């Protein structure tokens, strides 16, 4: 009986969660996205049907017997259908990632549909802001930036053998669910912009900015070359003898 109660409670809560569930949508940047409601859920005597973004910004207002009104910020970006209250968001951008909700007002305010939309991330750029180099150490600061003007800075320091990430930020959330990271992979600095759908990156070789590393490699190659040359002659001499 207790078990039965718990079971019933569980089923009821499951049903109520189910009816107001958020539909996750992963969408390609630049494509159009259609957001729909079930027409049979819309009361015939409704007074207002609203589509909102992140609970605040209104995309479209539907009232009976009137043309749908698209908000100023979405003018030209949204197509609304009077027939079925759907909304088409055109040319989806990363900044469009977020929660879209349709609510209808009749005797009660009722949620009709909710979508959690994630768009692909935008490209990331990397700039080298400063390089300071001496004979046995080198330090460079890079900035990773996304198209929607998020930035992170980080400083990398190398001695003649190894490089490490010293200062600045390593990670930052850009849009909800997306993050910008900067890190070191061997002698590559990588800016990575990623979310659940996609990632983009940009990379630079530390060797291109810290010249002493190159110099070292050239020197040791030459050294090894001579070493092998002399070894070769030694062996040759041995054979001749
Ligand atoms: C609603 O209308 C739009 C635009 O006419 C259409 O593309 C979409 O398929 C319709 N959706 C439903 C569920 O009828
Ligand atoms: C990155 O570094 C530059 C130069 O030190 C600084 O002007 C800028 O504010 C920094 N940006 C961030 C996001 O920390
Ligand atoms: C970028 O980050 C994503 C998600 O964390 C990961 O799957 C991907 O391998 C990373 N790309 C690079 C080049 O590190």
Image (cartoon, rainbow, N blue to C red):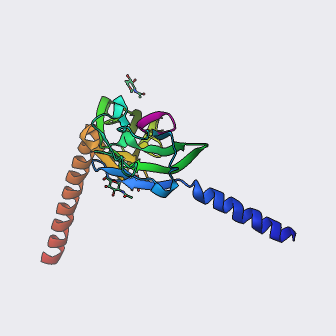
Query: Could you say where residue 79 lies in the image, as x and y percent from the top left?
Result: 31, 43
Query: Could you say where residue 160 lies in the image, as x and y percent from the top left?
Result: 35, 42
Dividing the image into 4 quarters, which one contains the N terminus?
bottom right
Residue in view at x 31 percent, y 36 percent:
147
Quarter of image, ligand 1? bottom left
Judged left or right of residue 182, residue 5 is right
Residue range corresponding to the magenta coloring = 53-62
Position of residue 40 relative to residue 214, above or below, is: below
For residue 9, say whether it is visible.
yes
Residue in view at x 50 percent, y 49 percent:
44
- Majority SS type along the magenta span: strand
Judged left or right of residue 13, residue 187 is left
Examine the image and state in which quarter residue 237 appears: bottom left
Residue in view at x 43 percent, y 49 percent:
117
For residue 38, say whether it is visible.
no
- Tell me how many marks there are: 0
Query: Could you say where residue 170 lies in the image, as x and y percent from the top left?
Result: 46, 39
Is residue 92 shown in magenta?
A: no
């Amino acid at each position: 009986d207790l078990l039965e109660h718990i079971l019933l409670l569980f089923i009821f809560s499951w049903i109520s969660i189910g009816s107001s569930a958020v539909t996750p949508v992963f969408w390609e940047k630049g494509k159009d996205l259609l957001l729909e409601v079930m027409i049979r859920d819309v009361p015939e005597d409704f007074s207002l049907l609203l589509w909102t973004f992140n609970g605040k910004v209104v995309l479209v207002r539907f009232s009976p017997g009137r043309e749908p009104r698209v908000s100023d910020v979405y003018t030209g970006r949204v197509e609304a259908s009077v027939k079925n209250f759907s909304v088409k968001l055109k040319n989806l951008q990363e900044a469009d990632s977020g929660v879209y909700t349709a609510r209808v007002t009749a005797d009660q305010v009722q949620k009709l549909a909710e979508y959690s939309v994630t768009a692909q991330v935008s490209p990331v750029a990397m700039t080298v802001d400063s390089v300071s180099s001496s004979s046995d150490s080198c330090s460079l600061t890079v900035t990773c930036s996304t198209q929607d003007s998020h930035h992170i800075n980080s400083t990398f320091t190398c001695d003649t053998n190894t490089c490490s990430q010293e200062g600045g930020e390593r990670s930052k959330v850009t849009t909800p669910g997306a993050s910008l990271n900067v890190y070191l992979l061997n002698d590559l600095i990588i800016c990575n912009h990623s979310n659940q759908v996609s990632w983009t990156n940009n990379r630079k070789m530390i060797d291109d900015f810290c010249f002493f590393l190159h110099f070292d490699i050239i020197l040791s190659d030459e050294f090894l070359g001579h070493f092998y040359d002399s070894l070769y002659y030694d062996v040759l001499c041995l054979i001749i003898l």
